[in-house]
Amino acid sequence: MKANLILLAAFAVSLAFSAVTVFGVLIWKARIQRRSPLHGRQVGHVPGQQLVKRHGEAGDGMLTSGLLMYLSAPTMLMAWALVRVPPDRMRIDGTTWVYALGAVVMFGWGAYDFIKHFKRAQNAKDGLLAERVTGMQLNRLVAEGCLVLHDLPAENFNIDHIVIGPRAVYAVETKSFRRPRGQSDTAAHRVTFDGKALRFADFVNTAAVEQAARQAQWLKRKLHESLGMDIPVVPALALPGWYIDKTEAGKTSDVVVFTPMGKGADFLARGQEKLAPEQRRMIAQALAVRYPAL
């Protein structure tokens, strides 16, 4: 009887701690969703999006089934051992607290790792949504004579989108920043670009602008190596869901910051033609070889 009570207590404590951890993370997740600039907006689907969703659900189901198979033998072995251990041998001594401490450490490490991977998954989800929204808006430019590529592999990084337009080639980096809390929707979704930094209501970011510039420089160098021509490449930074205010320096900056929503990306297809249609096709072919074979 004592052994059974100890077993039930161990399961109850572990279950309670797990429930508190998961419940806390879910509350935090709901708070994050309220801060997303794209939260609550209707966003169209890309080809295969439902298949991607079903693939993820199937992967989660496989993980759960795998854990069940993995824990089946140890769980049954523990249950078998407990019913055969004499009650007089189930006493608390010094080694009991060592095992208890080990259980706490293991649970703590597991909870820490769970939250870390949850944050990574949430950031990846936000980034994926932002890139899909931007990509769908950029794809409309094909009708304007542009060629559009997505997720181009580079050297230890990728370029989210490349728009080969009549005036230039645009290396587009997409970022998903969560809106500040405690403000109205209009004020919370505004950001100021001063030519060097993105100035949000409660923080400043320079890394995104610098990243867009670096990626454009890399693309320009690679196109010169591949084609032997000096191709105009413009760094661009897309912020879906944000209203962008620009200072005078921001308006003349080498890095173009824009929102792809509505007609915000139409400028990529405008301007004096510097790249003929044949040149655009050559550029697209030179970049397409970087995609891996299936």
Image (spheres, rainbow, N blue to C red):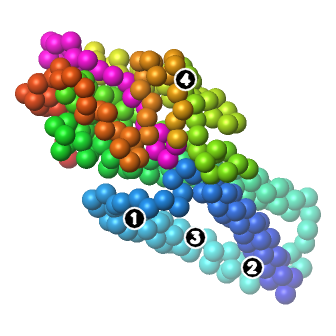
Depth-wise, is mark 4 or mark 1 nearer the camera? Answer: 4
Q: Which mark is residue 247?
A: 4
- Compared across the picture, whether 43 is left or right of 233 comes to right
Q: Residues within 10 Å of mark 2 (few under 14, many from 20)?
A: some
Estimate the spatial distance between the alpha carbons at disc 3 and disc 4, rounded to whole Å. Answer: 60 Å
In primary-sequence order, the first of circles 1 and 3 is 1
Residue 239 is inside the magenta segment: yes
Q: Are marks 1 and 3 in contact (CB under 8 Å)?
A: no
Estimate the spatial distance between the alpha carbons at disc 2 and disc 3, rounded to whole Å. Answer: 17 Å
Q: Disc 2 residue type?
A: Leu
User: How many numbered discs, if any?
Assistant: 4
Per the rendered image, the range of residues in magenta is 222-242
Q: Position of residue 61 (x, y in %)?
A: 46, 70
**Residue at 67% over, 33% down:** 203
In primary-sequence order, the first of circles 4 and 1 is 1
Up the image or down, 271 lies above or below 38; here it is above
